[in-house]
Image: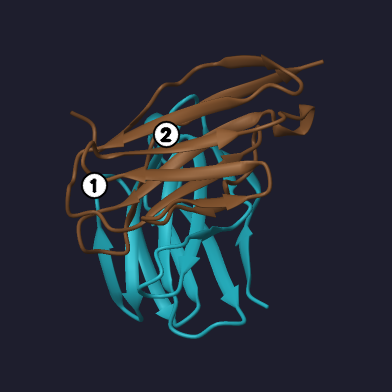
Chain colours: A cyan, B brown
Amino acid sequence: SQTIHQWPATLVQPVGSPLSLECTVEGTSNPNLYWYRQAAGRGLQLLFYSVGIGQISSEVPQNLSASRPQDRQFILSSKKLLLSDSGFYLCAWSVSGTGELFFGEGSRLTVL
Amino acid sequence: RKEVEQDPGPFNVPEGATVAFNCTYSNSASQSFFWYRQDCRKEPKLLMSVYSSGNEDGRFTAQLNRASQYISLLIRDSKLSDSATYLCAVNKGNTDKLIFGTGTRLQVFP
């Protein structure tokens, strides 16, 4: 069966520090991969979307970047965090064409 | 107009009640529709896909109305454990990208 792992689960970072969140999927090949952010009391915002290694689509202009160095690995990064980057970051995967997303357990980021 | 809109609620209902949520979407090219459940401080989990003919899974029934561009979720015989936020999701045009509503909060009380 397919599983998705995301880490770290919680982190507190100062403004201006770098960020790296990692996500891996097991049990499937060539998944679509996604990064979403959910700010406190708000909906899920799609940040990045990837259909394959090195293929990243950025959905909104922001202080973040994403990379997909391997088929089942997706990384979210920032060089310098802003206060507004605080939120609940969720990695997800889907089988191309099905539309059904399956989420990791999320990473809760607080920028101070 | 937002791409996907939901009434944020909360909907406060007694155990055993029937409750329904609607979700409207703006892109008529959308083809895939879903309901997700999200518990407090947890990740969303797929509750059910919404098919053109409608579909039922136990106490849950989902419907799609393409003409009016909305989907609905009906929960019968509500349980305390149904308390959660229900998110609708619609694909963006002809892509696999899912756009989520902000969610409808349901609170079932004894």
The image shows residue A30 at horizontal and vertical percentages of 43, 83
- Quadrant of image for the N terminus of chain A: bottom right
Q: Looking at the image, which is closer to me, B28 or A84? A: B28
Q: Which residue is mark 2?
A: A43
Q: Are marks 2 and 1 on the same chain?
A: yes
Mark 2 is on which residue type?
Gly
Q: Secondary structure at mark 2?
A: loop
Residue B42 in the image: above or below residue A91: above
Mark 1 is on which residue type?
Val
Q: Looking at the image, which is closer to me, B91 or A5? A: B91
Whether residue A80 is visible: no
Residue B62 in the image: above or below residue A77: above
Q: Which residue is mark 1?
A: A60
Please name the residue shown 75% across and 23% down the image: B16
Q: Secondary structure at mark 1?
A: loop
The image shows residue A20 at horizontal and vertical percentages of 49, 57
Please name the residue shown 17% across and 54% down the image: B29
Q: Chain of mark 1?
A: A
